[in-house]
Structure formats: C-alpha cells, structure tokens
Image (cartoon, rainbow, N blue to C red):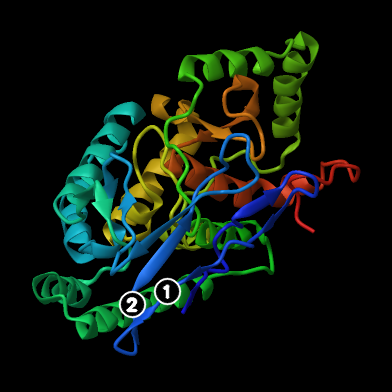
Amino acid sequence: MLLHDAKQRGTFHSARWQRDYSPDLCWISTTVGRSQPASSVVLGDFPHSQHRPSVIHIGLQLSIIRGVQRRRWNFRKADWASSTFATERSIPLIPVNNIIVEESYQHFCGAMQKGARHSIPQGFRPTYTPCLDVESQDLLKQYEESGDPDIADHLIRSLDAARRHRLEKLTSKMNFTHSSRKSWALIRRLYAAQLPPKSTHPSVIANAVASHLIQVTKAPHNMKFERQVPMQGRTLLQQMSDKSLPHRFTEEKISAALQKTKPETAPGDDNIHVEFLKNLAPKVRTWLSKFFSRIMATHSIPKIWKNAKVIAVEKPGKDPSLAANYRPISLLSVCYKLLERLALQRIFPTVEGLLSPDQAGFRKG
C-alpha cells in the first residue's frame, strides 16, 4: 500500500525552481490481507539539503494539538438561557442617570461577567485531538485495551465522519459575495492543519515591537486643522433647523445593529464579547438603549472605551525576528463599536450630502 498524503508538503524542495516535489515514496506491507494503519509527516527544511525528512509511524496514531495556555470562553457549550436570566435580574437595576457614566458601565460589565462565569465554560486544553467526541473516546479506550484492528478501523471512520461534519458546517458559512478574505482565511487554516505547527514563541520581544509601532505612528500635529474641525462642527449645528436633543435609541435599533455585528470577534479592554450582547434579554436592551441615549445627550463616554488592545500580527513571508515586520491591530470595546454603528445610522443622511464626491473610502457604493 502506498502511503501518501497530497496535502503534505513535498519531500524535495528545488532550490532552482522554488517548487516542491515528492520523489520519496513509502510503501506499507499488508498483514493477513489487511493494510496496517500508518501515517507520515514531512518535516521542515533540512540544513544544507533540498530533501526534507519524513517520519513514518506504523499503527494507530491520532493527531494531537497543543493548545495555547490562555483561558477562553467556550460559546458552543454556553447555557444562554441561564446567562440571560442572570443579567435580566441584575442589569435593569443599575442606575442610568443618578450616577456617572463610568460607574454605570463598570456595574454593567461586572454583571455581564458574573452571568457569563456561571453559565459559560471557560478554560483551555493543554493537548487535544480535534473532533474526538464521546463515541470516539470509547472506541479509543477499547482499542488501547484490546488492540483489535477492527476497532481501529471503526475509530478512524468515526473520526472522519465527525471531521467531515465539522468541515461541512464551516464551509457552509463561507461567503465570497461581499468579502472573500474570511473565506480564504478558513481555507488556509484547513490546509495548514496538515503542515507541521509553527512555533508559538516569536523570536522578537514585545517591547521591541511596541517601540517600533510608537515611532512609525508619530505624526506631526496640524494645529490649524485641529482648530477648524470644532469650528466647522459648531457652524453646522447652528445651521440645523432642529436643535432639540437627539431622540432616544430604541430597542429595535439596538437589535437591528446587533444582527449586523459580526460574531466571533475579539473583545476590547473591557472583555465584553459580542456574543454576550447578542443574547441579551429585552429588559437589558432597554437599559442599554437608555445608557447610549445618555451618552449622546451628555457627550461623555466611559474612559475604558478610549483604551485599545494593540495586537502585533506577523506579516506573511517576512522575517519574524525583525520588529518592523509586524503590523498592529487595535481591539476596541464591542459596546463602543455598537454605539458607533447606531450613531452612523443617525448622522448618515446629513453627513452624506456634505462629503466631497472625490472621497470614495468608507462610503457605500
């Protein structure tokens, strides 16, 4: 039996043509007319050689992935009914107008985190096998006790069925209509699962990356432009016919904005996930509408919304040992971005007519 995996990297990398080939083949003999379970892994580049070493394992071997030792919420096993019930009992009791905005939002974050801790599992797995469900775990235990090849075949079929179901579920969410970036990222992750894992420890320290980002983001201040912006804003307000306070945000507006918010996005400095907001009870959304309306009326936002988590992401194909080969990603508060979406919907009809037709970025159409 020929042991070959087309998704593995080539066993020979041509330095002249910069392409991979697989001239090194592996054949596995059969035992009593049955093929033995085997697997192969092509390792990375070998020093001073165009050939890559291959590791052949005879016998049943399940892929083991080492997880990152960072606690995360497991939203797949979340008890949203319990979380919604807990936040519905506590958050509507938080004052909106009698205390400062900062204190109200601190109580809101505390209630959200408390409800999540009691209903959403949180932790990390040091090592795990993808799609190893309860049925596969029982088959693996039986195989380790007996060594029966029939059980091994049944285990492999069970794992393949679970992985196929997971793959179909992921690919069904792929959408190339608006933006293909996320879909192609999923395809790359599925392909990268067949390659040897990269080291999770970068060869450059965080302070070096931070120092480089501070240097490249320093820009000279244009004092004349900074003075013109508030003056033009006051002039625009004076020209408006309706000078009354803005209307209160409704629960329907918040629900519509949450439906357009992308799930599975990283939280900001307040650690409030978008999944928390998508599963809020109607009474909590009513409280949130009053809180947002007060912010718009008083022009005061929580200080934590001004903070951002800056994550340095390695540029593909660049040397990871150089601090200049990392680009920053700023993670803002999900609640702050939700309020921005609501404010944009309100000011869009007025602002759209004031923008120059030469401005094409960040506009519809």
Q: Which of 261 and 352 lies nearest the eye of the viewer?
A: 261
Residue under the image location 56 percent in, 49 percent down: 52
Q: Where is residue 221 in the image (x, y as percent from the top left)?
A: 73, 11
The quarter of the displayed image where residue 351 is located: top right
In the rendered view, tell whether residue 130 sits above or below residue 236. Answer: below
Is 1 on the left-hand or right-hand side of 354?
A: left
| Residue 264 visible to an observer of this rendering | yes
Residue extending furthest bottom? 33
Is 151 on the left-hand or right-hand side of 43?
A: left
Disc number for residue 28: 1
Residue extending furthest left? 145
Residue under the image location 22 percent in, 41 percent down: 94
Q: Where is residue 270 in the image (x, y as percent from the top left)?
A: 35, 35
Q: Which of 191 and 89 lies nearest the eye of the viewer?
A: 191
Which secondary structure, mark 2?
loop
Q: Which of 221 and 93 lies nearest the eye of the viewer?
A: 221
The quarter of the displayed image where residue 327 is located: top right
| Amino acid carrying mark 2 in the image | Gln
The C terminus lies in quadrant: bottom right
For the residues marked 1 and 2, what is the alpha-carbon distance in whole angstroms?
7 Å
Which secondary structure, mark 1?
loop
Residue that badge 2 annotates: 36
